[in-house]
Amino acid sequence: MATVEKLPMLAEGYAKLNAELKRLKAERPQIVDAIEEARAHGDLSENAEYHAAKERQGQIEASIADIEDKLSRAQIIDPTELSGDKIVFGATVTLLDEDDKPVRYQIVGQAEADAKTGRISYNSPLGRALIGRKVDDEIEVSVPAGDRYYLVSGIEFI
């Protein structure tokens, strides 16, 4: 029997996925109406509206299935309940780059990652390099732009 891999995420990410699921489910009846309306136009083989509506329906159903899968495997982690001296999922990390310029990242799930807001996935190259590290550890990360070097200067659980 296959084991189900848990998907760590913050409560905020879980709520965002739930909201997206509700939005997609609310869109279902509109797509069905669009398909019915397009069907009424006659010949389906040359009916672009029909094909577009069917394609959108397929996209919505695939998205709903994907989100339901993620929600069913979700393992909600509250960073404020964590502690320790190692970087783990949910930790907010302050790094010094090669120019001693501080950068802050929070280690989050894939669905929540947004580098522009300082949230990186635990599965990203930098996220994988950070997990398990401590303050004053040096980290080398290979990214498309080349190798980057960081020094862990702080770990917070906020």
Image (tube, helix red, strand yellow):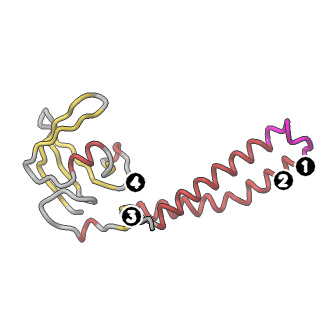
Q: Amino acid at mark 2?
A: Glu
Give the mark, 3 or 4, whose residue is nearer the N terminus.
Answer: 3
Q: Nearer the viewer, residue 79 or 67?
A: 67
Compared across the picture, whether 142 is left or right of 24 comes to: left
Q: CA distance from mark 1 to mark 2?
A: 6 Å
Residue drawn at x 77%, y 42% as measured from the top left: 51
Q: Main secondary structure of the magenta part?
A: loop
Q: Earlier in the sequence, mark 2 or mark 3?
A: 3
Q: What distance separates the C-alpha of mark 2 from that of mark 3?
A: 40 Å
Residue type at mark 3 is Lys
- The residue carrying mark 4 is 112
Q: Residue at the spot x=38%, y=64% of the render? A: 6
Q: Secondary structure at mark 4?
A: helix
Q: Secondary structure at mark 1?
A: loop
Relative depth, front residue between 125 and 103: 125
Magenta part of the chain = 40-49
The residue carrying pointer 2 sits among few (fewer than 14), some (14 to 19) or many (20 or more) residues within 10 Å by Cα, namely few
Disc 2 target residue: 36
Closer to us: 142 or 93: 142
Q: Quick one: 109 or 26, which is closer to the camera?
A: 109
How far apart, in angstroms, are the residues tagged by discs 1 and 4? 42 Å
For the residues bearing labels 1 and 2, Cβ distance under 8 angstroms: yes
User: In the displayed structure, does residue 144 sit left or right of residue 59?
Assistant: left
Q: Which residue is mark 1?
A: 40
Q: Is residue 130 left or right of residue 113?
A: left
Which label number is shown at residue 6?
Answer: 3
